[in-house]
Amino acid sequence: MIEVIYFAWLRERIGVPRESLQTEALTVADLVAELSAREERYALAFGDLASVRVALDQELADFAAPLAGVREVAFFPPMTGG
């Protein structure tokens, strides 16, 4: 079971802040493809991956990163300095 957390406009588009999932996905990209195939709201949220960042167990990662052993996946927009 993986806990998936959505932040900012991703949460708004998907409509939930977090969910627990059973997945067969091997990588973050596989998970995104699986989520996008579920419903249109996910497909819209993940339509432009250049605008999405990911953290695995609170460590920044990329979409090719493996999910083996990961307990938490967080998706969020790029952060800006301030």
Image (tube, rainbow, N blue to C red):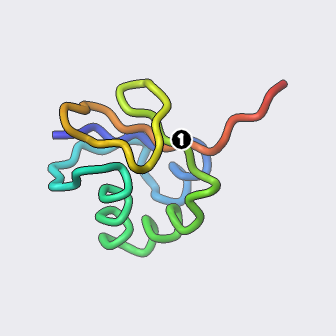
Q: Position of residue 2 (x, y in %)?
A: 23, 39
The residue depicted at 43 percent of the width and 65 percent of the height is: 42
User: Is 50 located above or below residue 69 in the figure?
Assistant: below
Q: Residues within 10 Å of mark 1 (few under 14, many from 20)?
A: some
Q: Nearer the viewer, residue 33 or 38?
A: 33
Image-based side of 39 in relation to 23, left or right: right
The residue depicted at 31 percent of the width and 55 percent of the height is: 31
Image-based side of 2 in relation to 9, left or right: left
Q: Quadrant of residue 72?
A: top left
Q: Which residue is mark 1?
A: 7
Q: Nearer the viewer, residue 77 or 27?
A: 27
The amino acid type, in three-letter code, at marker 1 is Phe
User: Is 47 located above or below residue 70 in the figure?
Assistant: below
User: Is 18 located above or below residue 26 in the figure?
Assistant: above
Image-based side of 32 in relation to 48, left or right: left
The residue depicted at 36 percent of the width and 38 percent of the height is: 73
Q: Nearer the viewer, residue 15 or 25?
A: 25
Image-based side of 71 in relation to 37, left or right: left
Which quadrant is home to the N terminus?
top left
Q: Position of residue 77 (x, y in %)?
A: 62, 45
Q: Position of residue 39 (x, y in %)?
A: 36, 72
Which quadrant is home to the C terminus?
top right
Q: Secondary structure at mark 1?
A: loop
Q: Position of residue 61 (x, y in %)?
A: 46, 36
Q: Residue furthest right?
A: 82
The residue depicted at 18 percent of the width and 53 percent of the height is: 23
